[in-house]
Image (cartoon, rainbow, N blue to C red):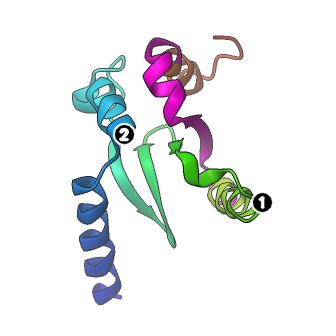
Amino acid sequence: MRGLRIHETKRARELRRCETAAEEQLWRRLRGRRLNGFKFVRQEPIGPYFGDFVCRAQKLVVELDGATHGTDVEIEHDERRSAYLADRGYRVVRFTNAEVFEAPDSVVETILAALERRTTV
C-alpha cells in the first residue's frame, strides 16, 4: 500500500509541474485560501483519479477540460470519473480552459456558489 501512495505522490507532483496555462491561471485565484477562506489542493489523488483542484472540506472537485475532452470516448471517461467521485461523496464542477481564459470571474463565482451550496450564481 505504501508503494502505491509513493507512486500517487510522484504522479501528483509531475502533474503540478506540467500544469496547463488554464490550471495555472485558476490556481492563482484559488491558492492560499484566496476564495473566501476555502482551502484547495492541486492534483489530489482520489482512487485511480487525480482531481485538478479539490476542496477537501467541502468535497468539491473542480475539473478543467481542455481540447482532449470532446470525443465520445473522452466524454464517457469523464462521466465514469464523475460517477466514481460522486459515489465517494464528491461533487464535481467542470469548466473548459476557454472559460477560465474568457470569463475567469464567472468561473470563480460558480466555484464559490458550489462551495456555499447556492443554487444560483
Quadrant containing the N terminus is: bottom left
Name the residue: 49% across, 18% down: 102
| Kind of element beneath mark 2 | helix
The residue beneath circle 1 is 72
Residue 90 seen in the current view: yes
Along the viewing direction, whichever of 61 and 104 lies nearer the viewer: 104
Name the residue: 31% across, 23% down: 29
Q: Position of residue 107 (x, y in %)?
A: 51, 21
Along the viewing direction, whichever of 88 and 47 lies nearer the viewer: 47
Along the viewing direction, whichever of 79 and 97 lies nearer the viewer: 97
Amino acid type for the residue under numbered disc 2 = Glu
Q: Position of residue 22 (x, y in %)?
A: 39, 35
Q: Nearer the viewer, mark 2 or mark 1?
A: 1
- Answer whether residue 92 is magenta in the image: yes
Q: Position of residue 36 (x, y in %)?
A: 36, 16
Question: In the image, is 66 to the left or to the right of 9?
Answer: right
Distance Cα–Cα, label 2 vs label 1: 24 Å
Question: In the image, is 104 to the left or to the right of 8?
Answer: right
Name the residue: 49% across, 35% down: 97
Instruction: Tell me where the magenta segment starts and ends, as one range.
Output: 87-106
Question: In the image, is 32 to the left or to the right of 92?
Answer: left
Question: In the image, is 30 to the left or to the right of 70?
Answer: left
| Kind of element beneath mark 1 | helix
In the rendered image, the vertical position of residue 53 relative to residue 36, given as above or below: below
Quadrant containing the C terminus is: top right
- Answer whether residue 18 is magenta in the image: no
The residue beneath circle 2 is 23
> How many other residues sit within 10 Å of disc 2, few (<14), some (14-19) or many (≥20)?
some
In the rendered image, the vertical position of residue 85 relative to residue 41, given as above or below: below
The numbered dot on residue 109 is: none
Based on the displayed image, in which of its 4 quarters is residue 110 positioned? top right
